[in-house]
Amino acid sequence: MDFRLPDDVRQLGDAAARRFARLGGVDLARRAEADPAVRREAADALRDLGTDDLDVRADEEQLLAGGALCRAAGAVALPWPLVGQLLRSGAHLLALVDERGLRVDHGDAAPSWIGADLDGRAWLLTDLATPTTGKLGPFVRTGVLGEQIEPIAADDRARYLVLQAWTVLGALEAVTADVVEHVRTRHQFGHALADFQVIRFSLADAAIAVRGLEQLTKLTSWRLGTGDARGNLADAIALRLHASEVATNVLRVGHQFYGALGFCDETDLSVIDRHLQPVLRYPLSAERMAQSLIPYVRDQSFTSAIA
């Protein structure tokens, strides 16, 4: 297959990157933590980009367009529930959740939500206004399950996970570029960090992993329009699991080479890492996501990414 994105999709991604840069890039996420009302700037920017007219369910190109938006949003830790908005049903935004510990990122940013688990069971969500405790995921809200509603289709659950992977991809691309610039300018023992072979090798491994995630994300997006619903969901779960694994390794490398500075909010790495955590942790942890793939392997719904 041709891994090049359609021109319209690429142009939308470029336009989104420019628009988000005008908002201040990662600094918008910093400002939003101090004043959550600032998130309306992100919502306005998405509206200007035509998000309300985008239907990621319609065809492959519109799904890729949604992916390009999520990629650009991930690169700046855009403080807005973009994936849920792209998969909204009427006035309801969609969130994949774990009913045993209901948490929704930016749950207070929209008045109405549908929560669905990976099996498709769905509920209206209520009381999404209470912040969770802790520093990770500054806009995560807890809530309760309300009225149970019609199940969410497997293809929509697959699209949700794929769009999450596009978000992770954008974040990791930004982190990799940021860390490369850091090691080029930071000196120790009279040499730039980039002069040390072990650092170059580690960054090369990280860059290769991110490029591999890019190709798998594109491939899985394309396969959503060609396979059966159960196989599509299995592919999406595997992609989402792989995105978590790549993120863990790339973020580890970033923090290793930044040192303590990487945990200071003055660095983009710190902000992106913290805002990315809800995407990596919800609806399930990496371990439980891997366990959820087992039934698809057993019944051969999932074979491999290149089957």
Image (spheres, rainbow, N blue to C red):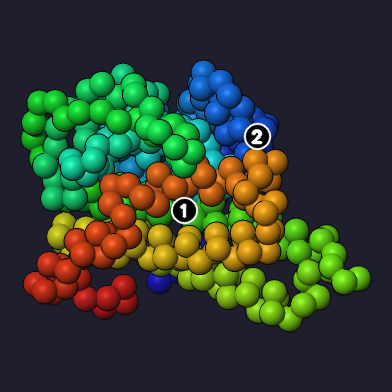
Q: Secondary structure at mark 1?
A: helix
- Residue type of the residue flagged with mark 1: Val
Dot 2 alpha-carbon crowd within 10 angstroms: few under 14, some 14 to 19, many 20 or more: some
In the image, farthest residue toward the right:
190
Left or right: where 15 falls relative to 53 = right
Q: Position of residue 62 (x, y in %)?
A: 38, 45
What mark, if any, has residue 168 been given in the picture? 1
Left or right: where 89 falls relative to 77 = left
Q: Which residue is mark 2?
A: 27
Left or right: where 69 falls relative to 103 = right
Query: Where, quadrant-wise, is the C terminus in this rendering?
Result: bottom left
Residue at (17% x, 69% y) in the render: 294
Residue at (56% x, 20% y) in the render: 35
Placement of 272 over or under 192, stated as above or below: above
272 or 300: which is nearer to us? 272
Mark 1 and mark 2: Cα distance apart in space:
18 Å
Q: Position of residue 9 (x, y in %)?
A: 49, 48
Q: Position of residue 289 (x, y in %)?
A: 26, 59
Q: Secondary structure at mark 2?
A: helix
Query: Where, quadrant-wise, is the N terminus in this rendering?
Result: bottom left
Placement of 243 over or under 297, stated as above or below: above
Residue 279 visible: yes
- Residue type of the residue flagged with mark 2: Asp
Left or right: where 84 falls relative to 273 = left
Quarter of the view holding residue 14: top right
Placement of 102 over or under 277, stated as above or below: above
291 or 59: which is nearer to us? 291
124 or 60: which is nearer to us? 124
Residue at (40% x, 60% y) in the render: 244
Residue at (61% x, 32% y) in the render: 30
292 or 257: which is nearer to us? 257
